[in-house]
Amino acid sequence: MSKVASLAEVVAEREVTAVNLYDLAKQRDRLGGRIEARIDDVLKHGQFILGPEVAELEEELAKFAGARHAIGVSSGRDGLTMAMMALGVGPGDAVFVPGFTFSASAASVAPLGAEPVFVDVDPDTFNMDPAALEEAIAAVERDGRLTPKAVMPVDLYGLPADYAAISGISARHGMRVLADAAQSFGGMLGNSQVGTLAPITATSFYPTKPLGAYGDGGAIFTEDDDLAEAVMMIRTHGRQGSGDHALRIGMTARLDTIQAAVLLVKLQSFSEELVRRRQVAEAYTELLSGLVETPKVSDGAKSAWALYTVKVPDRDAVRERLAAAGVGTGLFYAVPLHHHPAFERWVPEGLSLPVSERLAGEVLSLPIHGDLEDAEIAFVVDKLKDALA
């Protein structure tokens, strides 16, 4: 739906009474038979841990992303911690994390004895602001207590961060970049896919992600053979291959075979679903122009559109009206990271991240997925207009 002459005309095509934020049932109706057949194969061969489907999926994920290595892991959050372990992050190190994202980004740093340093974000892209990163690094260097070690941009809502600028800043300060691509697998910068935009990347296959499993799961991508070998050891207790000796501290962090089987089927239709997500986003942007502040996509970038997030005045009241009208929405995220009680020990006195703080009171995510119909888009827009009025 690139052009819509009349909302009422589109809604009349099919009566719509409610639209959920997520709707995995439609995808299951399309793919369920094939998924069940792949799961049945796993049940028959019984290799539930690192079975052949895991290796097959890793090969297909690497091919899709254009990456040298893809390693299946237990979750996106575990993937972040594992990637930092492979990079050698440890006690006394600073890891720079955007202040406006899900708590897992910062929480993944804590088990290593390192500390998250919160960085403000760009008001248009919602991603880490390179200028704010420079300021945060300078503050850490002046303080002298921590060693700047890694930068963790988060590709919020599916849009890749400004990796060119962030990588340049990181290199000047002797740091490595770890991409938190939990929401952005399928996104692009220029001709490069997410998975190849940083030395190491972690993504999530949580069920509501653009490519979602039927449980927890994730993957790590890298071009570096040494990092790939380290990650593969870390995910199996620090062992190499079938050996009994732990060569390094590791985790139990494998992607299980049944989830790999599910993802293999979903990956086959993933490109088509990404196209539909982009069509939905374009339709929302056209129909909502002038009503709310719609998301912006950087020049040369393609978002995976994990979420379509607008800025809305009087957000909470609008959300309540939408819920009453049958439209599901999401708050991602209502609390900036430096205001979370769990992270207060790492927040310098007086720290202010004004953009993150403002966005937390404005953002509202609308329904978007690969099976959203034109009539449902029109219904959401119609009800949002009413809620704003």
Image: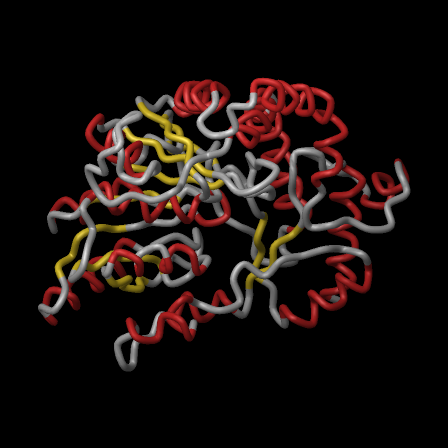
The C terminus lies in quadrant: bottom right
The residue positioned 69% from the left and 65% from the top of the image is: 319
- Coordinates of residue 224 in the picture (x, y in percent): 22, 28
Residue 1 drawn above or below residue 175? above
- Image side of residue 235 versus residue 44, left or right: left
- Image side of residue 93 versus residue 347, left or right: left
- Coordinates of residue 308 in the picture (x, y in percent): 59, 48
Number of marks drawn: 0
The residue positioned 12% from the left and 69% from the top of the image is: 145
Q: Nearer the viewer, residue 342 or 300?
A: 342
Residue 338 drawn above or below residue 45? below
When asked about the image quadrant of residue 144, the answer is: bottom left
Q: Nearer the viewer, residue 328 or 382?
A: 328
Residue 161 drawn above or below residue 312? above
- Image side of residue 74 versus residue 27, left or right: left
The residue positioned 65% from the left and 39% from the top of the image is: 369
The N terminus lies in quadrant: top right
Identify the image's colour scheme: rainbow, by chain, secondary structure or one colour.
secondary structure
- Coordinates of residue 174 in the picture (x, y in percent): 11, 47
Q: Nearer the viewer, residue 137 or 223?
A: 223
- Image side of residue 265 versus residue 168, left or right: right
When asked about the image quadrant of residue 242, the answer is: top left
When asked about the image quadrant of residue 279, the answer is: top right
Residue 134 drawn above or below residue 318? above
- Coordinates of residue 272 in the picture (x, y in percent): 61, 24
Task: Point out the residue furthest to the front here.
Answer: 244
Task: Point out the residue furthest to the bottom here.
Answer: 350
